[in-house]
Image (cartoon, rainbow, N blue to C red):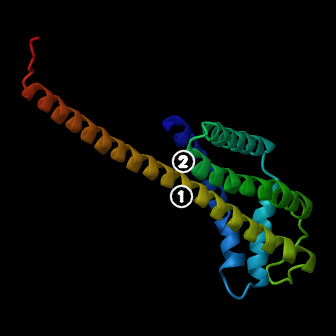
Amino acid sequence: MGVRASVVVCVTSFLLGSLFTHWIADSLTLWKSPVTDEHLWTAALYYSILTRGPVQILYVLFAITILGGTTIFWSFNDLEAGNLMFDGGSIFLYGLSVIMYAYSVIPNLLDQFTAIPAYHVKDAFPRLLRAPTLDLASHHLVCSVALTGVLILQAGRWWAELADGDDEEGYLTEKVEDSDVVDETKSSTPLTTTSP
């Protein structure tokens, strides 16, 4: 169980880290107000650089994602109460993040940002690219929040199992003490035999 939880936490942390690298572009479009054409050009240029990267990076990202999903499902298969609640929530959030990335982020990147038009920093940002640029930033944020939820659920699962372990130890200690008291009372009462 500990190895599976470690794999889930490591994979989720890796995926969160890879999403945080997009903060360079996402912070300009989500958190800076007003969103200027210069911010949008910077974000679009960043996304276009991503599309020109080696495809092997995407394969590694897919392999790591599959490893994390497989591990969560494997842990969920134990069918314990803690696994059903915490791993069920983790599966939902992890799946939400994977589906959003696979069906929204990657197609948006490949359709809109493989070739951006030549520009000068002072040029007006094309209207056709404005919505996809803002959508990428918001989708990255949703994926980051969902993966953070996976980490919180896994930490909650660890804490609940730790608390259950402490309760079991207390229960077992009480059981042993009770059985010692019963043994002492049995040994202290004299055995009387009646003769016929």
For mark 2, give the secondary structure: helix
Seen from the viewer's position, the closer of residues 82 and 105 is: 82
Give the tally of numbered discs.
2
Residue 190 screen position, x and y as percent = 6, 24
Is any atom of residue 153 visible in this view? Answer: yes
Place residue 144 in its image quadrant. Answer: bottom right
User: Residue type at mark 1?
Assistant: Ile
* Relative height, residue 135 to residue 65 (above, below): below
From the viewer's side, name the closer residue of 52 and 171. Answer: 171
In the rendered image of this protein, does residue 142 appear above or below residue 33? Answer: above
Residue 21 visible? The answer is no
- Residue at 68% over, 67% down: 141
- Pointer 2 residue: 82
Across and down, in percent, residue 57 comes to 74, 44
The residue at the point 66 percent across, 59 percent down is 19
Secondary structure at numbered mark 1? helix
Residue 18 drawn at (x, y percent): 65, 54
The residue nearer to you, when weighing 82 against 183, is: 183
Q: Quadrant of residue 68?
A: top right
The answer to whether 80 is drawn above or below residue 107 in the figure is above
Marks 1 and 2 sit apart, C-alpha to C-alpha, by: 14 Å
Residue 146 percent coordinates (x, y): 65, 61
Callout 1 environment at 10 Å: few (<14), some (14 to 19), or many (20+)?
A: some
Residue ranking furthest to the front: 196
Numbered disc in front, either 1 or 2: 2
Q: Earlier in the sequence, mark 1 or mark 2?
A: 2
Q: Is residue 77 above or below residue 183?
A: below
**Residue at 78% of width from left, 77% of height from top?**
40
Residue type at tag 2: Gly
Residue tagged 1: 152
Report the quarter where the C terminus lies.
top left
Question: Viewer-proximal residue, 84 or 17?
Answer: 84
